[in-house]
Image (cartoon, helix red, strand yellow):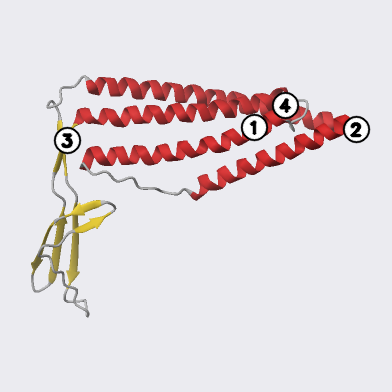
Amino acid sequence: MKENNIRKINKMGKIGYIVSNICTIMLYVAAVACIVAGAMLLAVPYDAIKVTTAHTAVVEVDKANNSALVTFETDGMTVEIDGVIYNNISTEETLAKSTTTAATTPYTYSLRDVYIVFFTGAAVCAVFSILMKNIRDLFAGFRDCETPFTTETADRLQKTGLLFIPVMVGGWIITAVQKYISTGMVDVTVHIDLTMVLLIVMVLTLSAVFRYGAVLQQLSDETL
């Protein structure tokens, strides 16, 4: 019975090792592709391609069917939505409806500046590849093990759980860099992904379980 369970663990470890190895290679390729794309953009003259962005929001109020008439005072008004400041606001009134238009100040940037996004993406891919390599080593341990309850397995699980944190932070940084390039505003928005948090807690809990199992395994071996 014990040998049968170990064979199942070895088999799952072999499958996980192959899949994680493929994922690691794909991350290496993605990191190299980001670096190459960033380097190509750096070669583009600064004034060769310019991009101008602007955001617009429109609020329409139907006067005929709205019992509580909504009005907007637009003189000197600014509105911030998701970190974007709308400072050009105007209202047009007719007998049927009121239309308020809010727009941001147009912002122009060079397409060459997007190289920062690609280099940041390469850094995140590099961190992700370290995580995936650790997962690959974890599966390699299951593939070759005679018992899964070892301190090495517990250590790898703990390291895997902790490596998810910089990967999550890397996503915030990429979003912030993209926003800075397209709007000129520094705005790091922290999005707590509860699924990712739950995954981190689960992996760290498994690490503690395997560490305890390793202690019991050692006591059992010493008794025998």
Q: Which residue is mark 3?
A: 109
| Mark-to-mark CA distance, 1 and 2 | 25 Å
* Callouts 3 and 2 close, C-beta under 8 Å: no
- Residue 91 is situated, as x and y percent measured from the top left of the image, at 10, 65
- Name the N-terminal-most of marks 1 and 2: 1
- Name the N-terminal-most of marks 1 and 4: 4
Q: Residue at x 61, y 36 (%)?
A: 158
Q: Nearer the viewer, mark 1 or mark 4?
A: 1
* Callouts 1 and 2 close, C-beta under 8 Å: no
Instruction: For label 1, count other residues whose C-alpha is less than 10 Å away and answer few (under 14), some (14-19) or many (20+).
Output: some
Q: Which residue is mark 2?
A: 223
Q: Residue at x 32, y 28 (%)?
A: 118
Q: Which residue is mark 1?
A: 155
- Residue 36 is situated, as x and y percent measured from the top left of the image, at 32, 20
Instruction: For label 3, count other residues whose C-alpha is less than 10 Å away and answer few (under 14), some (14-19) or many (20+).
Output: some
Q: Which residue is mark 4?
A: 10
Q: Is residue 39 above or below residue 121?
A: above
* Callouts 1 and 4 close, C-beta under 8 Å: no
Q: Could you tell me the amino acid type at mark 3? A: Tyr
224 lies left or right of 34: right
